[in-house]
Amino acid sequence: MDDPTAVLDRMWAVVPAGGAGTRLWPLSRAGEPKFLLDLTGAGRTLLQQTVDRLVPLVGGRVMVVTGARHADAVRRQLPELGAEDVVAEPSPRDSMAAIGLAAAILERREPEALLGSFAADHVIGGAEAFRACVAEAALVADTGRIVTIGIEPTHASTAFGYLRVGAPLPGFRTAREVVSFVEKPDAETARRYLAGGEHRWNGGMFVSRAGVLLDELAREHPGLADGLRTIAAEPERLDELWPGLTRIAIDHAVAEPAAARGMVATVPGSFGWDDIGDFASLAGLLPEDAGRRGVKVLGPADLVHVRDSTGVVVAHDRPIVVLGLDDVVVVDAGDALLVTDLAHAQDVKAAVELLKDAGRADLT
């Protein structure tokens, strides 16, 4: 097995920072998506927390791929990054184009580079356990496999995709083969996965040699791989070539077909993980407040007054009183107010469509 330090010295952290997080409206919006926000009360945005977790592993070798609209905000939040390490996409083309462009740039810079892709808007508890997991994934990836972090499921979730694990990989502490990737299941299937112990949540974290990732992409989508490599070689052609690139997620483009050929491994992650997909998820991450028993609060807690209620409240700059309501969601963003309940947390994105239909796209 290679020296772990030598392998990590060739690894770059790639942070795709995209999406509008519409299930967290009116906090998260197209112009200021959730990765630019502090949603945990930690004093650091989700993007900054992501980079904070990765720096002990990779030092300054961090590249963020984000939309052109958000590039300046990313640079302000991460002033330590070099100008060439904030890559701006002209338009959204899904995760494969974003991660693949980073891979193509790194392949030209350092032909032996490894990359680990970690979303900008996930919350992870247990930083040391996370880094140990990524370090093992890097060692496995250096043998030529694509490696994903398989999150140990804590409940029978229907909100996440899954991966089915196979035999242990000889020579590694916890790594196992990936038999297949599975789309988001129904409730009964999710319960079966949880009980069987052979499935992990697909957290969307991948580690690979940059060249291996692009070669696998070339096998399945040669035009996309060629386009990304051309952009990396001729950056001035980005605006010309980008709109013609295939729009596809990395799971469908590379991970699933590579798994079918025995090319994908997983390192199980037992650390806490959440993608803050909605306000129910956010409520589970916020700490209890003894003075507001049953209601989680984000923002100025002294503005929130509660009696006989449960749920989550996001305060802005005016008092909020909640009386006799269970599982309530109240989100005050100053220019917009959302009131719903936790049972409808996954439906909040419909509010964005309602506003667009009403001619208020300025609020979305």
Image: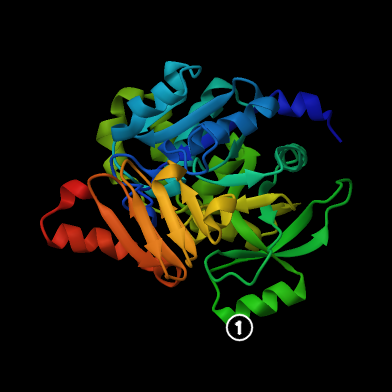
Image point 57% across, 79% down: which residue? 187
Which x, y percent locates residue 362? 17, 46
Which x, y percent locates residue 31? 28, 40
Residue bearing mark 1: 188
- Identify the image quadrant of residue 294: bottom right
Q: Taking 26 as reference, is 347 above or below it? A: below
Classify residue 142 as left or right of residue 342.
right
* 71 and 115: which is toward the camera: 71
Number of labelled discs?
A: 1
Q: Taking 278 as reference, is 342 above or below it? A: below
Which x, y percent locates residue 77? 44, 25
Check the picture and name the quadrant holding the N terminus: top right
Residue 319, visible in the rendered structure: yes
* 153 and 40: which is toward the camera: 40
Secondary structure under tag 1 reads helix
Give, as a three-letter code, the residue at label 1: Glu
Image point 69% across, 28% down: which residue? 57
Tell me the crowding category of disc 1: few under 14, some 14 to 19, or many 20 or more residues within 10 angstroms, Cα based.
few
Classify residue 155 as left or right of residue 226.
right
- Identify the image quadrant of residue 302: top left
Residue 289, visible in the rendered structure: no
In the displayed orientation, state which residue is furthest to the right: 171
In the displayed orientation, state which residue is furthest to the left: 359
* 149 and 331: which is toward the camera: 331
Classify residue 21 as left or right of residue 148.
left
